[in-house]
Image (cartoon, rainbow, N blue to C red):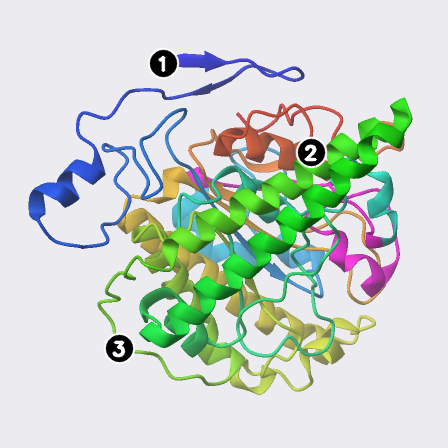
């Protein structure tokens, strides 16, 4: 084992054992062009020889309306905490997940702040932050860009609808729209484009590269006239352009590589509740084939609640105002989500991927009825952590732990050598 020290927080240790055999060698020996799944023992991505910690994976599952507190947060602190009814489907994975109380981003604004869930930064404040309002998925995706066909696979089970979570944001403050139908997710993962389409895409990448070259030429002409402070900004600007240029080249390289075989029939689009389990299965296949190592799944506001026994819309149930009927409907919607999450964890475990995959479930909304963004429903499963079922962080003002501290810890576990993530103040010491 090799220890990788971080600037703040406890030392994080990653396995650094070298591969006995490269995946590229396996492909050459077979004399065929075949997309293999990622094997931890080989330790190499399709992008090149392995260097650094073994590859990690990250999946975020989010909804826009939060969770009923009494049905999500366990009673008690620690491994023996009592699970509420809606977490009962996760009982078999008790040693592989942790629920966190009192974590949030220290701000309130109802639906207007749900977009901060994975970043901790309002889009309006992005210009004041070193990394803008980049979300955790995009932050991790930058670390593995070029190593998989999709640095990040952002998906949603059908149309976003009312109260969209606006889950994923780039460093430059651009909202990343999710792929919204399971048929389209399947096509992107497993269907090769026709040759003429590939030719057009290559031409598009070449054109973008030419534009970047022109921008760099013009930018360098400005440099002699800049002050010392402006030159620092200029260097940051040039770094951003070079990152875009590198990303374009790496993405372009994947256009000529065949997609893996799915092993399943192309799914049909249906209602949200029909698409959710299929979407989980497709994300699992994406991880198994190493098509991506970072994915998000958005449960949209356009939820067909009658299919799970609800009597109002998902949004309507979230505005329950303590009405027993609406709360019962919300409880059924949330129970469905927990059942699907448990099923996903079952399948990850069966594929021997759970310990190397960090699964984050949560929402940018704490209490959908009161429109508050405090004490967010946060659950982390897998990832090889020493899980404790329920961790109760301090609730007192001045002692609260930023949610971004947890995100920093997850980024380090993923293999990113960093000592900060957006509004983090240190790592999260309660998750070992």
| Residue 348 covered by magenta stretch | no
Q: Is residue 33 left or right of residue 96?
A: left
**Whole-percent x, y for residue 268 in the image:** 38, 84
Circle 1 sits in a helix, a strand or a loop, which is it? loop
Q: Residue at x 71, y 80 (%)?
A: 325
Report, in whole angstroms, how far the alpha carbon at label 3 lies from the one at label 1: 42 Å
Circle 2 sits in a helix, a strand or a loop, which is it? loop
Residue under label 3, please give it.
Answer: 265
Q: Which segment is the magenta one?
A: 95-123
Q: Nearer the viewer, residue 37 or 301?
A: 37
Residue under label 2, please give it.
Answer: 421
How many circles with numbers are drawn on the protein? 3
Residue under label 1, please give it.
Answer: 1
| CB contact under 8 Å: marks 3 and 1 | no
Q: Name above or below for residue 144 compared with residue 62.
A: above
Q: Earlier in the sequence, mark 3 or mark 1?
A: 1
Q: Name above or below for residue 413 compared with residue 70.
A: above
Q: Is residue 294 left or right of residue 31?
A: right
Q: Nearer the viewer, residue 278 or 83?
A: 278
Q: Earlier in the sequence, mark 1 or mark 2?
A: 1
Q: Residue at x 70, y 60 (%)?
A: 175
Q: Is residue 102 left or right of residue 342?
A: right
**Whole-percent x, y for residue 99 in the image:** 59, 43
């Amino acid at each position: 084992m090799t220890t990788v020290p971080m600037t703040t927080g406890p030392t994080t240790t990653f396995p650094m054992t070298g591969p006995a055999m490269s995946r590229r060698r396996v492909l050459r020996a077979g004399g065929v062009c075949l997309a293999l799944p990622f094997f931890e023992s080989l330790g190499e991505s399709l992008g090149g020889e392995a260097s650094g910690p073994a590859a990690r994976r990250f999946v975020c599952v989010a909804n826009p309306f939060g969770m009923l507190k009494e049905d999500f947060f366990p009673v008690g602190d620690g491994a023996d905490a009592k699970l509420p009814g809606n977490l009962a489907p996760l009982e078999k994975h008790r040693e592989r997940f942790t629920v966190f109380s009192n974590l949030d981003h220290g701000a309130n604004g109802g639906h207007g702040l749900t977009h901060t869930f994975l970043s901790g930064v309002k889009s309006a404040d992005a210009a004041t932050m070193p990394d803008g309002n980049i979300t955790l998925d995009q932050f991790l995706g930058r670390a593995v860009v070029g190593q998989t066909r999709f640095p990040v696979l952002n998906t949603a089970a059908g149309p976003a609808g009312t109260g969209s979570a606006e889950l994923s944001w780039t460093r430059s403050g651009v909202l990343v729209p999710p792929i919204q139908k399971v048929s389209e997710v399947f096509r992107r993962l497993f269907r090769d484009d026709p040759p003429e389409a590939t030719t057009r895409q290559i031409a598009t990448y070449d054109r973008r590269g030419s534009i970047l070259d022109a921008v760099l030429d013009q930018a360098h002409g400005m440099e002699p006239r800049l002050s010392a402070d402006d030159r620092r900004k200029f260097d940051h600007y040039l770094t951003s352009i070079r990152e875009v240029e590198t990303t374009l080249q790496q993405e372009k390289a994947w256009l000529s590589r065949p997609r893996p075989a799915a092993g399943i029939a192309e799914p049909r689009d249906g209602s949200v509740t029909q698409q959710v389990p299929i979407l989980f299965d497709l994300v699992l296949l994406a991880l198994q084939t190493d098509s991506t190592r970072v994915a998000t799944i958005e449960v949209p506001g356009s939820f067909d609640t009658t299919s799970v026994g609800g009597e109002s819309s998902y949004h309507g149930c979230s505005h329950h105002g303590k009405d027993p009927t609406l709360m019962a409907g919300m409880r059924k919607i949330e129970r469905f989500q927990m059942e699907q999450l448990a099923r996903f964890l079952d399948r990850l475990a069966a594929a021997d991927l759970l310990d190397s995959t960090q699964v984050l479930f949560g929402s940018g909304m704490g209490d959908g009825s009161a429109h508050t963004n405090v004490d967010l429903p946060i659950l982390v499963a897998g990832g090889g952590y020493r899980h404790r079922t329920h961790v109760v962080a301090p609730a007192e003002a001045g002692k609260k732990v930023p949610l971004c501290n947890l995100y920093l810890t997850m980024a380090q576990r993923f293999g990113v050598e960093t000592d900060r993530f957006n509004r983090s103040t240190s790592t999260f010491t309660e998750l070992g």
